Image (cartoon, rainbow, N blue to C red):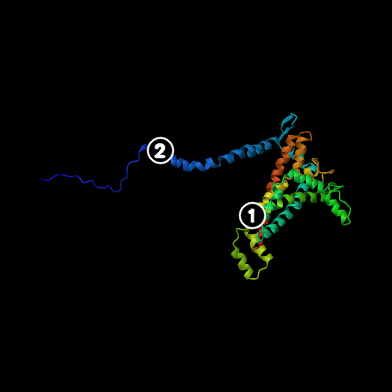
Amino acid sequence: MTTNVEVARPRHGRQDPVTPPRRRSMRLGRLDLKFSPYLFVAPFFLLFAVFGAYPLVYTAVLSLRKNTLTGGDAGFVGFENYSKVLQDEHFWKVIGNTFGLFIVATVPQLILALMIASWLNKKMRARTLIRMGVLIPNITSVAAVGIVFGLIFADRYGLANWVIHSVGFDPVEWRNHRWSSWTAIAFMVDWRWTGYNALIYLAAMQAIPKELYESASLDGASAFRRFWRITVPLIQPTILFTVIISTIGGMQLFTEPLLFNYGRIQGGSLNEFQTVAMYIYETTFMNNFNVGKGAAISWLLFLIILIFALVNFLLVRRSVRGTTS
């Protein structure tokens, strides 16, 4: 007697049908992979739009109008505010002060930061403690720094004049001369930011392989040559970063010269050290409350910072590349 028994055979090359819940889950997974990164970075862009982009656009609109804080609004005037600013001799004077303070303060600051970072990169006792101590000036209140240095560079009883008088020179009227006021403010800026830049350079130096220094040392290269031919070229991106950040900060210098002059916005009796940021404040909140002109100066400062940062970027990149040629 024979019976027909159907033997189950595997069905090769066929898949089980996807159920609707599983299909929905797969679709949600693809959407999650596609849009999750945008959701993660969205808070930054929202904050930037509110506190960065909107003020920038609103300032650009104000610069094309003749507005005052007292309520006066003469409407759209085009580039009239820019024309008045560019024809103002006082504007060019504060531009010169800002550039001068930037050069006097920033160039020694970055050079000194490189030297300090090279020293901190060596083996020494209490290395971590020393590195932490270098950052103390940066976390100190800028108001406290301004008050202390204001007393140090006081005309009559300041510590700086006491030292100068002790070595046989006449005391200096620090706030009445351009060179003296720039020197004092540069000391304030450098004392606060040199350690910060030094730690940035130190972090970049520690990423350089030690074998490069050992090979150069075996070839007879001196310490200075190893620093100039190995360290500087390899930390080029970090140098460019600090130059650009220092350019932005230097062109916006405000607090240090303001506190150095005991809170007076004029920057000396003859505006010897009044910066562009101080001039913007004076124009907008003290001199007829001219919002339109203050906005125009702000946008001109923005464009100057962009151009100057780009020039610094090109010059530094070319000079650093020259060390490897």
Does 143 appear above or below 67? Answer: below
Q: Is residue 92 visible?
A: no
Q: Amino acid at mark 2?
A: Arg
Number of other residues with Cα within 10 Å of mark 2, as a class: few under 14, some 14 to 19, many 20 or more: few
User: Where the C terminus falls, by quadrant?
Assistant: bottom right
Is residue 99 shown left or right of residue 120? right
Q: Nearer the viewer, residue 78 or 233?
A: 233
Residue picked out by circle 1: 238
Task: Please name the residue shown 63% across and 39% down the image.
Answer: 53
Q: How far across and how far down the image is residue 222, in percent? A: 68, 68
Q: How far across and how far down the image is residue 59, in percent? A: 68, 37
Q: Is residue 260 visible?
A: yes
Q: Nearer the viewer, residue 21 or 301?
A: 21
**Contact check, label 2 and label 1, Cβ < 8 Å:** no
Q: Secondary structure at mark 1?
A: helix
Residue picked out by circle 2: 24
Mark identifier at residue 2: none
Q: Amino acid at mark 1?
A: Thr
Is residue 226 shown left or right of residue 155? left
Q: Which residue is at the far top?
A: 71
Q: How far across and how far down the image is residue 151, in percent? A: 81, 46
Task: Please name the residue shown 72% across and 54% down the image.
Answer: 109
Q: Secondary structure at mark 2?
A: helix
Q: Earlier in the sequence, mark 2 or mark 1?
A: 2
Find the distance from the CA under tag 2 to the CA under tag 1.
Answer: 48 Å
Number of other residues with Cα within 10 Å of mark 1, as a class: few under 14, some 14 to 19, many 20 or more: some
